[in-house]
Image (spheres, rainbow, N blue to C red):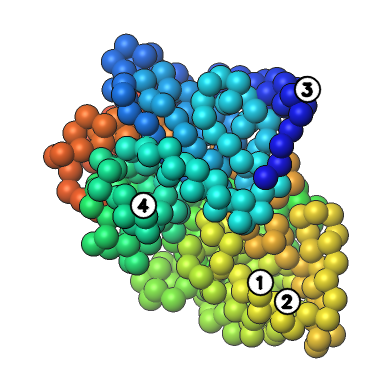
């Protein structure tokens, strides 16, 4: 794990602080909640274990939780940690660790450090911490927590179903997150990141979006708004019909593999872009993943049919295939709008909504865990409606 000298850490912390100041000034919902939490201190005596992308917007959330009396011990997600934000938070007495250069083994060690600190509430992203408590046999010490994303919700309702004895509020189940963060923010940030990282033109380019959930809907919408030619792969018949009625070409991946120039996965599921499809792609196809885990593109299968591999710029990697064609992989198959070069992630306003969902759901756990059912569950309706009213007021929108 990367260690920074004291002078470098001070410089990183100052740079991170300047970035956080800009973000903080534009998160009106969390600003109001900060004052409320400062007065009421709902997390006094609680230790919150965190596994979440460590970037400036996350820093504002962690500040707000700390103002509410929480002791924070946490780490980032693999490949998306921003070192200046870690340095800034540590300088504020907020216990986060890890670095952008961490290997996957380092990341797993960081998760273990979080659990070694014996948190009693979890703020999870991908259900890694929840799974860790089950593996260690310490899940009974957790009073409850939240889960940020689709992939984690799937794990809680799949491999971890019946094994997690504490309530876990799945933020991704909120309609506010689906509309504000997944559709509009992910859609915007993925398309912006594609343009910035590849420097390729969107108008007229042929895109295949794999998955037509909320994130896939947003990605497709923003690509088409900029002139992209968009096709959808979707295994759910109802979502596929919706995509067709929305005016997109809908077809199996086998049909679209030779047609598309860019493939973007948005499912949360492993192996949705398999090696056999990659082998059928046109020369120069670009592969990118927007899901939480780096398992949607079969990178191991891609390497098995590669005769030469070239790092183009640290974020783009060229694979020359045995069939004489080549493909380009973005950010090693990780979530490229946060793991790519100069990442910005989702918009400030969308994360103001999303992190209000996190903060108020964690407050509900801290104060009322005994009244919640164990396992994965949606954000309580009163929380959704409170935030919707607050955001409408912040936007000056009429109701």
Disc nearest the viewer among 1 and 4:
4
Q: Is residue 89 left or right of residue 29?
A: right
State the quadrant of the N terminus: top right
Q: Determine which residue is flagged by label 4.
A: 133
Can residue 272 be seen in the rendering of this structure? Answer: yes
Q: Residue 7 bears which disc, if any?
A: 3
Q: Secondary structure at mark 1?
A: helix
Disc nearest the viewer among 3 and 2:
3
Residue at the farthest top position? 39
Note whether 53 is above or below 127 in the view shown.
above
Q: Are marks 3 and 1 in contact (CB under 8 Å)?
A: no
- Residue 341, given in percent of the width and then of the height, sits at 74, 46
- Residue 91, given in percent of the width and then of the height, sits at 60, 21
Q: Determine which residue is flagged by label 1.
A: 299
Camera-side residue of 239 and 151: 151
Q: Are marks 1 and 2 in contact (CB under 8 Å)?
A: yes
How far apart in space, not on screen, are marks 3 and 2 (Cα)? 40 Å
How far apart in space, not on screen, are marks 4 and 2 (Cα)? 34 Å
Q: Determine which residue is flagged by label 2.
A: 303
Q: Secondary structure at mark 4?
A: helix
Residue at (70%, 57%) from the top-left corner?
331
Residue at (59%, 85%) from the top-left corner?
254
Note whether 292 is above or below 303 in the view shown.
above
Can residue 178 be seen in the rendering of this structure? Answer: no
Q: Residue 221 bears which disc, if any?
A: none
């Amino acid at each position: 794990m990367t260690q920074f000298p004291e002078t470098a850490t001070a410089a990183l912390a100052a740079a991170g602080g300047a970035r956080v100041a800009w973000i903080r000034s534009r998160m009106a919902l969390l600003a109001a909640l900060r004052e409320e939490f400062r007065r009421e201190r709902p997390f006094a005596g609680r230790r919150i274990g965190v596994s979440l992308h460590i970037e400036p917007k996350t820093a504002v959330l962690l500040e707000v939780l700390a103002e509410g009396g929480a002791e924070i011990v946490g780490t980032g997600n693999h490949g998306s940690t921003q070192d200046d934000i870690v340095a800034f938070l540590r300088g504020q007495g907020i216990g986060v660790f890890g670095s952008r250069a961490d290997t996957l083994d380092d990341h797993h060690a960081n998760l273990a450090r979080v659990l070694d600190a014996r948190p009693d509430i979890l703020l999870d992203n991908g259900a890694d911490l929840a799974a860790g408590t089950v593996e260690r046999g310490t899940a009974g010490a957790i009073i409850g927590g939240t889960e940020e994303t689709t992939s984690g919700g799937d794990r809680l309702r799949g491999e971890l179903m019946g094994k997690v004895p504490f309530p876990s509020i799945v933020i991704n189940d909120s309609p506010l997150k689906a509309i504000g963060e997944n559709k509009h923010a992910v859609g915007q940030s993925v398309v912006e990141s594609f343009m910035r990282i590849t420097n390729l033109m969107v108008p007229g380019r042929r895109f295949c979006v794999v998955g037509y959930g909320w994130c896939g809907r947003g990605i497709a919408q923003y690509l088409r708004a900029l002139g992209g030619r968009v096709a959808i792969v979707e295994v759910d018949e109802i979502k596929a019909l919706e995509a067709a009625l929305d005016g997109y070409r809908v077809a199996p991946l086998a049909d679209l593999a030779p047609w598309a120039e860019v493939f973007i996965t948005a499912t949360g599921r492993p192996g949705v872009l398999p090696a056999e499809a990659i082998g059928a792609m046109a020369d120069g196809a670009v592969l990118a993943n927007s899901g939480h885990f780096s398992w949607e593109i079969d990178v191991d299968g891609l390497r098995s049919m590669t005769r030469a591999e070239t790092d183009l710029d640290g974020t783009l990697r060229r694979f020359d295939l045995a069939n004489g064609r080549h493909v380009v992989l973005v950010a090693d198959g990780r979530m490229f709008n946060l793991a790519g070069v100069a990442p910005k992630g989702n918009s400030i306003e969308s994360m103001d909504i999303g992190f209000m969902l996190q903060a108020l759901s964690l407050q509900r756990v801290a104060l009322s865990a005994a009244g919640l059912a164990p396992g994965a569950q949606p954000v309580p309706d009163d929380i959704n409606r409170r935030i919707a009213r607050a955001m409408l007021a912040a936007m000056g929108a009429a109701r």
